[in-house]
Image (cartoon, rainbow, N blue to C red):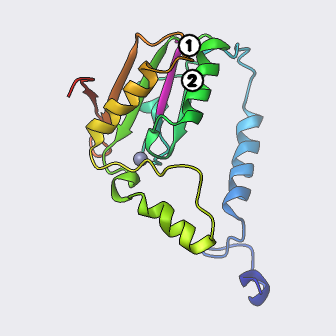
Amino acid sequence: MSISASQPQKPSSGPGTDSRTVTDRLVEANAKYAAAFTDPGMDARPVLKVAVVACMDARLDLHAALGLKLGDCHTIRNAGGVVTDDIIRSLTISQRALGTRSVVLIHHTGCGLLNLTEDFRHDIEAEVGQRPAWAVEAFKDLDQDVRQSMQRVRTSPFLPHRDDVRGFVFDVTTGLLREIDPRP
Ligand SMILES: [Zn+2]
């Protein structure tokens, strides 16, 4: 039995009685956004010809942190900002079909992946009886993982533009980027 089915009907006003799901709230916010929206008439190709690869972390507001505006860049995000095959897929499309030339990689302090190991994957296998095909890509050393990510981009045969690839660690407490030297 669901919680909502087991609870008596509550009035729809007042604190703590909001029955909307989070998605309901997002859809409502979108209606307001669309009401004030005017078509910027933009091309799909990013104005600054840059792709930013970053962690999905909720504290990292890429556009605000990097002074980016709508239409400026591609943002490609996953857990950790790790350069996986799927990130390479997106970067390949970004460069070959949509004209980007520069790649910026951003990891951050306090990343959830710092506390995980590949045991995460084994535990899932034990629980559900199937091992995920993907690696967790957990890491203990932020700087080293940024270096590895830069290396993966720079050695990808699919990417035509590999000369402007820079990596950074974003400090979630100060908002500041720290650039990582590709050579340890
Ligand atoms: Zn993270």
In whole angstroms, how far apart are the C-alphas of marks 2 and 1?
9 Å
Residue 116 in which image quadrant: bottom left
Point out residue 64 in the picture as x, y percentages from the top left corner: 45, 31
Point out residue 121 in the picture as x, y percentages from the top left corner: 50, 61
Instruction: Work out whether mark 2 precedes mark 1 in sequence or the reverse, and give the earlier one.
Output: 2
What residue span does the magenta drawing correspond to? 48-53
Q: Quadrant of the C terminus?
A: top left
Using the rendered image of the protein, determine whether residue 91 is visible from the camera's viewpoint.
yes
Judged by its main secondary structure, the magenta piece is strand
183 displayed left or right of 163: left
What amino acid is labelled 2 in the image? Leu
Question: Would you name the residue on which mark 1 appears?
Answer: 100
Pointers 2 and 1 in contact (CB under 8 A)? yes
Residue 49 magenta: yes
**Residue 127 against residue 55 in the figure, above or below:** below
Point out residue 175 in the picture as x, y percentages from the top left corner: 31, 38
